[in-house]
Image (spheres, rainbow, N blue to C red):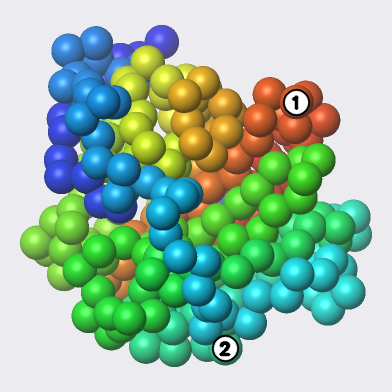
Amino acid sequence: MATSRASTITPIFSTQNPPKPAHSTHRTSIDPTFNRPNRRDFLGGLSLSAPLLLNLPSPSLAREVDVGSYLPQSTLDPSFVFFKASTKDTPALRAGNVMPYQFIIPPTWKQTRVANILSGNYCQPKCAEPWIEVKFEDDKQGKIQVVASPLIRLTNKPNATIEEIGTPEKLIASLGPFVTGNTLDPDELVETSIEKRGDQTYYKYVLETPFALTGAHNLAKATSKGNTVILFVASASDKQWQASRKTLEAMIDSFQV
């Protein structure tokens, strides 16, 4: 097992039929000297599921019905449907701050509304803080969400690639709170891998997070495009994980920008 030293940085928050990815995978563990965040001192305002936030209507056209009733069947796997975000879906896409992203999803899942305060609607086109793009969930299988962060939160280099931002360990040190909904300890990172799709690089993560607000099991995939870092997160409770791990992994694998 190769070990990488993670350094802490400021927490930040196509088309169908994509080419078959060529995987370059390595496993690693976090350096135990990593400066762990203190859970008790962590600001509740960073939580993606903070209970005090008003559940205001989102500009997103989220529909609380099965996505299979309006999304096309995936040609990658007919047991899934295909979602590709367009300018009608989020304010960031309309503002050009996020490039269209896509993934497959089970037809029984539902898209849920994103609270206005978390959607980035109030700050486009020049948001200084991360925001949630879209959310989907299923009571029996788990939930997924797409989180976007201004690149400037991670680097001063415009249009930086994810490799230029840092290693997978360095990136997750910043993105971790937005995977879990609260904090991420170094020993909760089980595995990292690097995936190449054409000229786009993705960092992938497997996390066991017993204290996470999002769920005890989290999978994540991140990449940088333009002036934004895009993070795709799939989460499940212990009970959901037993039945849906392969489904969540398939969604993570299919995600691309």
Location of residue 5 by image quarter: top left
Within 10 angstroms of label 1, few (less than 14), some, or many (20 or more) residues? few
Real-space Cα separation, disc 1 to disc 2, in angstroms: 35 Å
Q: Which residue is mark 1?
A: 239
Residue in view at x 33 percent, y 22 percent: 185
The vertical placement of 2 against 45, above or below, is above
Residue 149: give x, y in percent of width and height. Answer: 31, 61
Task: Tell me the number on the disc at residue 31.
Answer: none
> Left or right: where does residue 156 sit relative to residue 250?
left
Q: Secondary structure at mark 2?
A: loop
> Left or right: where does residue 240 sit relative to residue 154?
right
Residue type, mark 1 in image: Lys
Residue in view at x 24 percent, y 35 percent: 42
Residue 31: give x, y in percent of width and height. Answer: 24, 15
Q: Which image quarter holds the N terminus?
A: top left
Residue in view at x 44 percent, y 83 percent: 91
Q: Residue furthest left?
A: 156
Q: In terms of sequence position, does the residue under pointer 1 or pointer 2 come before the other?
A: 2
Q: Nearer the viewer, residue 208 or 158?
A: 208
The vertical placement of 246 against 64, above or below, is above
The vertical placement of 213 against 26, above or below, is below
Q: Which residue is mark 2?
A: 88
Residue 252: give x, y in percent of width and height. Answer: 61, 47
Q: Nearer the viewer, residue 254 or 128?
A: 128
Location of residue 243 by image quarter: top right
Is residue 19 at all visible to an observer of this figure? no
Residue type, mark 2 in image: Lys
Q: Nearer the viewer, residue 246 or 69?
A: 69
Residue 99: give x, y in percent of width and height. Answer: 44, 76
Please tell me whether mark 1 or mark 2 is closer to you in this view. 1
